[in-house]
Image (tube, grey):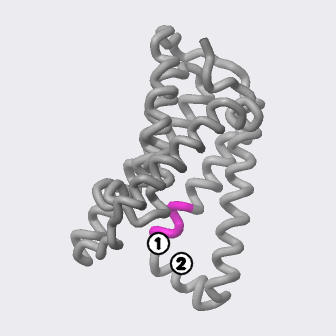
């Protein structure tokens, strides 16, 4: 469990650090934008690796026993989560409406998995990401109120179609193959 918590602290701590704009700007000024981005990516990758390894190695400690129907919640909610994730990189109406689609995807992912998993490691993992997603969204709303709403990129129906297609393909691939390979648990359990 310690490895999982360390990974969460590194990964989410690194993401929270980017909200400290003064400190971030000081590092960029000192080292340059490229080296800062490389260091940020390395820290995030290390945190993510520790999260996966820590979750897989954590002992199963049941906190609550989810009803059987809850295993369908992630299967259902992950499709729109993947679409939101894809829309974060595309000029689309989905992105414009969601405003922060990547955060929405993370919160949807975390909520779906919290509902379906009652073990301590899963609660720590998904609860931490959900708390971070909520805190990050609140922070962005406050920043937008202070600075005025950030201009939205042009939206296109082509972007919407691409987000749905890319999100659906990613959902199918991850559900059918990658979840088992990377996480060690089949996504589509009967």
Q: Main secondary structure of the magenta part?
A: helix
Residue drawn at point x = 31 percent, y = 71 percent:
152
Measure the alpha-carbon separation of dots 1 and 2. 6 Å
Give me the residue at 35% from left, 72% from top. Answer: 153
Q: Nearer the viewer, residue 167 or 1?
A: 167
Contact, mark 1 vs mark 2 (Cβ under 8 Å): yes
Using the image as rendered, state which of residue 182 and residue 4 is in the foreground: 182
Q: Which mark is residue 24?
A: 2
Q: How many labels does the image show?
A: 2
State the quadrant of the C terminus: top right
User: Is 38 displayed left or right of 137 in the figure?
Assistant: right
x and y, in percent, of residue 166 in the image: 54, 50
Q: Name the residue under label 1.
A: 20
Label 2 neighbour load within 10 Å: few <14, some 14-19, many 20+: some
Magenta residues (range): 15-19
Q: Residue 102: tell me if it is visible.
A: no
Q: Which residue is drawn at 76% across and 39% down?
A: 53
Quadrant, the N terminus = top right
What percent of the width, then of the height, locates residue 107?
Answer: 43, 43
Task: Confirm whether residue 124 shows in the render.
Answer: yes
């Amino acid at each position: 469990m310690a490895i999982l918590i360390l990974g969460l602290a590194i990964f989410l701590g690194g993401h929270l650090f980017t909200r400290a704009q003064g400190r971030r700007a000081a590092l960029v000024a000192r080292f340059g934008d490229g080296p800062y981005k490389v260091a940020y990516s390395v820290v995030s990758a290390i945190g993510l690796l520790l999260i996966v390894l820590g979750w897989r190695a954590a002992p199963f400690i049941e906190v609550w026993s989810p009803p059987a129907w809850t295993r369908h919640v992630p299967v259902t909610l992950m499709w729109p989560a993947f679409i939101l994730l894809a829309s974060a990189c595309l000029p689309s109406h989905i992105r414009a409406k969601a405003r922060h689609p990547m955060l929405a995807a993370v919160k949807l992912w975390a909520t779906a998995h919290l509902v379906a998993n009652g073990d301590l490691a899963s609660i720590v993992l998904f609860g931490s990401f959900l708390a971070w997603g909520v805190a990050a969204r609140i922070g962005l709303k406050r920043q937008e109120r202070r600075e005025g709403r950030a201009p939205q990129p042009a939206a296109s129906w082509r972007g919407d179609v691409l987000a749905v297609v890319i999100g659906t393909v990613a959902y199918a691939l991850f559900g059918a193959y990658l979840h088992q390979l990377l996480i060690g648990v089949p996504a589509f359990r009967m």
